[in-house]
Image (cartoon, rainbow, N blue to C red):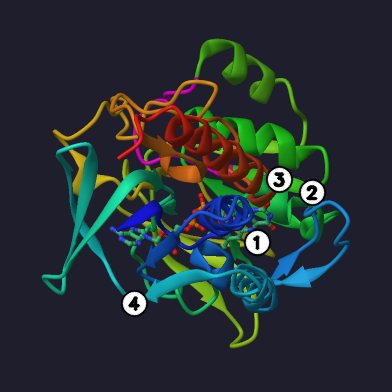
Amino acid sequence: PFEVLVVGGGPAGAAAAVYAARKGIRTGVVAERFGGQVLDTMAIENLISVPHTEGPKLARALETHVREYDVEIMNNQVATRLEEVGDGFRITLASGAALSAASVILSTGARWRRMGVPGEEQYLNKGVAFCPHCDGPLFKGKRIAVIGGGNSGVEAAIDLAGLAAHVTLIEFDKILRADDVLQRKLRGLSNVTVLTQARTTEVKGDGARVTGLAYEDRTSGETRELALDGIFVQIGLVPNTDWLKGTLALSPRGEIEVDRYGATSIPGVFAAGDCTVAPYKQIVIAMGEGAKASLAAFDHLIRLPAA
Ligand code: FAD
C-alpha cells in the first residue's frame, strides 16, 4: 500500500507528490492526464521565477521533477471511487484495479465550461481564453468580449476593461446575475458595452486567430456580428469531483471543502488545487496548496498508531 496516494497529476498533484516523496514515504500518483489543464495552455507568464513558459513544456517539467524521486506515476488512469477501509483508504480505478493508501490527496482540478459553439475549440488559445489573470495582458489595446454576466464574467470585464480598448459583455439572460456593486462598477466604465438576451452562436476566425463572433439577438431573433480580437468565456469552472459526491463534504458548487491545512471532512484525506473551495484558480496557487496538503498528510501519518 501507498503511504500517500495523490489523485490528479496537475500542478497541485505534482507538488504534493514531490513534497511527500521528499519525506521518504511511499508515494503514488494516479492521473487521468498527467499535466492537467496546463497541457491546454499556451503562454504561461505568471509562474513566479519562470517569466515565460508553455503548457506542454511546463507539464514535462512537472513530470521530470516528480520522476527525480521514487514516485510511482500511474498515468491515463481514472479514479472512480474512494472508500475508507480499515485504517486507510481504497481508490478504485475505471480499469477495475484498486489501490490502497494510508492517506489520500485529491487534486483532480477543474475544467472551464465551454459554450459549445462552432469555432470555440478551433480558436482555443488563438483568441478564445478563459483566464483573465493569465491571458488578459495579451489583449492590451484590443477589442474583446466576455461571455457570461455572473460574478466571474463581470469581474473579468471590469478587470479587462483596464487593459483592452473595448469590452463587450454578453449575457444570454435578460439581466446580469453579478452582485449589484460589480454591476454598478461595470456600468460606470466608458469602454464597456453590455448586451443582454444575446446568445453566442459562433466564434469567427481567419484560420489563424479569432476575428469576431456571431450572436442571436433573442429579442428580435436576428443574427448579428461583432469584430473582436479575443473572447473570454466565463460561464463556469466545474470541479472534477462528480465521483466524490456522497463521499465527502462538497460545496454547493461541487468544490471539495478543505480547512487551512487542506484537510477534507474525512480524516486522512486531503485536497488541493482547483478541485477545492480555495479561491483564485492559478498554477502558483495550486502548487502551494499541493505542497501544504502533502505536509499536512505527513503530519497525519506520523500521528497514526504504529501498525
Ligand atoms: P489540473 O491542472 O486541472 O489537474 C487535474 C489533474 O487531475 C489532471 O491530471 C487530471 O487528468 C486529473 N484528474 C481529474 N479527474 C481525475 C480522476 N477522476 N482520476 C484521476 N485523475 C483525475 N494558471 C496560471 O497560473 N497561469 C496561466 O497562464 C494559466 N493559463 C490557463 C489557460 C487555460 C486555457 C486553462 C484551462 C487554465 C489556465 N490556468 C492558468 C489555470 C491553471 O491551469 C490551473 O489553475 C491549474 O492547472 C490547477 O492545477 P490543479 O493541479 O489543481 O488541477
The amino acid at mark 4 is Asn
Residue occupied by mark 3: 133
Mark 3 within 8 Å of ligand 1, using the beta carbon: yes
Can residue 228 be seen at all in this image of the molecule?
Answer: no
Q: Secondary structure at mark 1?
A: strand
The amino acid at mark 2 is Ala
State the image quarter where residue 138 is shown.
bottom right
Task: Locate residue 197 relative to residue 294 in the image: left or right.
Answer: left
Q: Nearer the viewer, mark 3 or mark 2?
A: 3
Residue occupied by mark 4: 76
Q: Position of residue 7 (x, y in %)?
A: 37, 56
Q: Which residues are magenta?
A: 169-178
Q: Extreme front residue here?
A: 306
Q: Nearer the viewer, mark 4 or mark 1?
A: 4
Question: Is residue 152 positioned above or below 31 on the image?
Answer: above
Q: How many marks?
A: 4
Give the residue displayed 52% in from the left and 74% down from the top: 204
Can residue 82 be seen at all in this image of the molecule?
Answer: yes
Pointers 1 and 2 in contact (C-beta within 8 Å): yes
Q: Position of residue 87 (x, y in %)?
A: 22, 36
Mark 1 within 8 Å of ligand 1, using the beta carbon: no
On the rendered image, what quadrant is the N terminus found in? bottom left
Within-10-Å neighbours for mark 3: few <14, some 14–19, many 20+: some
Residue occupied by mark 1: 230
Residue occupied by mark 2: 164
Q: Is residue 203 magenta?
A: no
Instruction: Of the two numbered discs 3 and 2 on the same chain, state the one appearing first in sequence.
Output: 3
Q: CA distance from mark 3 to mark 4?
A: 30 Å
Pointers 3 and 2 in contact (C-beta within 8 Å): no
